[in-house]
Image: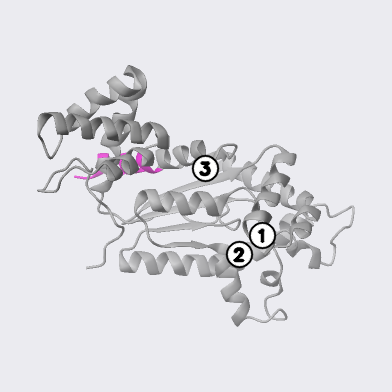
C-alpha cells in the first residue's frame, strides 16, 4: 500500500527507540519554534533523561521542561502545537496543500519547506505543469501557455488599449484555465495513489480548484507581498540564488503586470474566504501555513465517526 506521506510519531523515545535530540528539535521547529529555541529545549530534554537514566520521555514531562526553558506562555503554546502535530501524524487521509500567489511572493520556498515539515515527498509547481504542456501543444494551438503568466495578456488583440485595461488579467486567466487541466490531472493521480502532494504556483487561483475533495484534506492559501519595493527585492534575491538563471530584467520590467495579477488573486481570495498570508518573514509565513494544515486536520478529525 502506498504511504500518503512520511509520517513519524513524536520523537519521545517510544517503541524501543532511544530519544533523539535532533528529531525532537526538528519536530519542535515544525510546530513553529525557532531553531535556536528548539535545540535549547531538545538539549534540556536530553539532559533530563540522562539524569533520570531513562530512554524515553512522557509528553507531560516535555511540557514541564518547555515551561522551564521557554516560559509559561511560550512553553505551553509550543507543546500544545506539538500535541496537535502528533495528532496530524495519525491522520490517514492524503494532504493536498495548495500555495498560490503572484510571481515573486516566495511560493516555491514556502511550499518546499512546508512539504519537508509535513513529511510530504511530492512537490510540484504549476509552472512545471505549464512547461510540460508547452512541450506537447504548439503555440499556434494553445498560445497562452507559451508566455509567462504576466506576459500572456500581451498577445491579446486589445492589449495596451485604454478601453481594455484588464487585458493582463484576462490573458493570465486564459493561461490559468489551460494549465489547471494538467494540475487537476496531477491531483487526481495523487488521490488515486493515496499520495499527499504540495502544489504551488500563480495558477492556483481561488475558486478555480475545489477546496474540498472527498477522501483528502485540502488546504489552500495565497501568499502576497504588499510593499512594491519589497516585492521587487524578492527578484534580486532569487536572481542571486539561481546565479541569474531567471532573467532579472524581465521580472522587474513586468512588475506592474505582476502586481496587477497579485491584486486580482488577493481580492478573489478574500471574497472566497481563502487565507491570504503576507510573506514578510519566512518563518512566520511557514508557521501560518502549518497552522492552516493543523486546523484543517482538526476539522476532519472532529467529523470522523
**Residue furthest to the top:** 72
Figure check: 117 above or below 142: above
Viewer-closest of 73 and 184 = 73
- Please give the residue where the numbered disc 3 appears in the rendered image: 274
Q: Main secondary structure of the magenta part?
A: helix
- Please give the residue where the numbered disc 2 appears in the rendered image: 177
Position in image of residue 41 (x %, y %): 31, 31
Label 3's element? loop
- Please give the residue where the numbered disc 1 appears in the rendered image: 173
- Mark sitting on residue 106: none
Position in image of residue 122 (x %, y %): 41, 62
Label 2's element? helix
Position in image of residue 73 (x %, y %): 35, 19
Q: Residue 299: within the magenta?
A: yes
At 29% from the left and 57% from the top, the residue drawn is 6
Q: Is residue 211 visible?
A: no
Asked if residue 248 lies left or right of residue 285, the reply is: right
Q: Are marks 2 and 1 in contact (CB under 8 Å)?
A: yes
Q: Residues within 10 Å of mark 2 (few under 14, many from 20)?
A: some
Q: Which residues are magenta?
A: 293-305
Asked if residue 63 lies left or right of residue 283, the reply is: left
Amino acid at each position: 500500500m502506498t504511504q500518503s506521506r512520511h509520517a513519524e510519531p513524536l520523537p519521545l523515545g517510544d517503541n524501543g527507540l532511544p530519544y533523539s535530540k535532533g528529531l525532537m528539535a526538528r519536530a519542535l521547529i515544525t510546530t513553529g519554534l525557532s531553531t535556536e529555541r528548539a535545540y535549547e529545549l531538545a538539549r534540556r530534554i536530553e539532559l533530563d533523561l540522562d539524569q533520570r537514566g531513562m530512554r524515553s520521555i512522557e509528553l507531560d514531562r516535555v511540557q514541564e521542561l518547555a515551561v522551564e526553558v521557554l516560559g509559561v506562555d511560550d512553553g505551553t503554546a509550543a507543546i500544545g502545537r506539538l500535541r496537535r502535530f502528533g495528532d496530524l501524524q495519525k491522520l490517514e487521509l492524503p494532504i493536498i496543500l495548495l500555495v498560490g500567489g503572484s510571481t515573486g511572493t516566495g511560493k516555491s520556498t514556502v511550499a518546499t519547506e512546508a512539504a519537508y515539515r509535513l513529511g510530504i515527498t511530492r512537490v510540484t509547481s504549476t509552472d512545471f505543469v505549464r512547461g510540460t504542456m508547452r512541450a506537447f501543444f504548439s503555440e499556434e494551438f494553445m498560445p497562452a501557455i507559451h508566455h509567462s503568466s504576466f506576459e500572456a495578456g500581451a498577445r491579446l488583440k486589445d492589449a495596451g488599449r485604454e478601453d481594455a485595461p484588464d487585458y493582463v488579467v484576462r490573458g493570465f486567466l486564459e493561461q490559468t484555465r489551460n494549465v489547471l487541466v494538467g494540475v487537476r490531472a496531477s491531483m487526481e493521480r495523487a488521490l488515486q495513489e493515496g499520495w499527499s502532494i504540495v502544489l504551488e504556483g500563480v495558477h492556483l487561483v481561488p475558486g478555480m480548484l475545489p477546496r474540498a475533495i472527498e477522501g483528502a484534506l485540502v488546504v489552500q492559501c495565497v501568499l502576497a507581498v504588499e510593499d512594491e519595493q519589497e516585492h521587487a527585492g524578492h527578484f534580486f534575491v532569487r536572481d542571486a540564488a539561481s546565479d541569474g538563471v531567471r532573467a532579472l530584467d524581465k521580472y522587474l520590467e513586468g512588475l506592474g503586470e505582476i502586481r496587477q495579477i497579485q491584486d486580482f488573486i488577493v481580492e478573489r481570495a478574500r471574497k472566497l474566504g481563502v487565507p491570504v498570508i503576507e510573506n514578510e518573514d519566512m518563518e512566520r509565513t511557514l508557521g501560518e501555513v502549518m497552522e492552516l494544515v493543523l486546523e484543517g486536520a482538526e476539522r476532519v478529525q472532529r467529523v470522523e465517526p
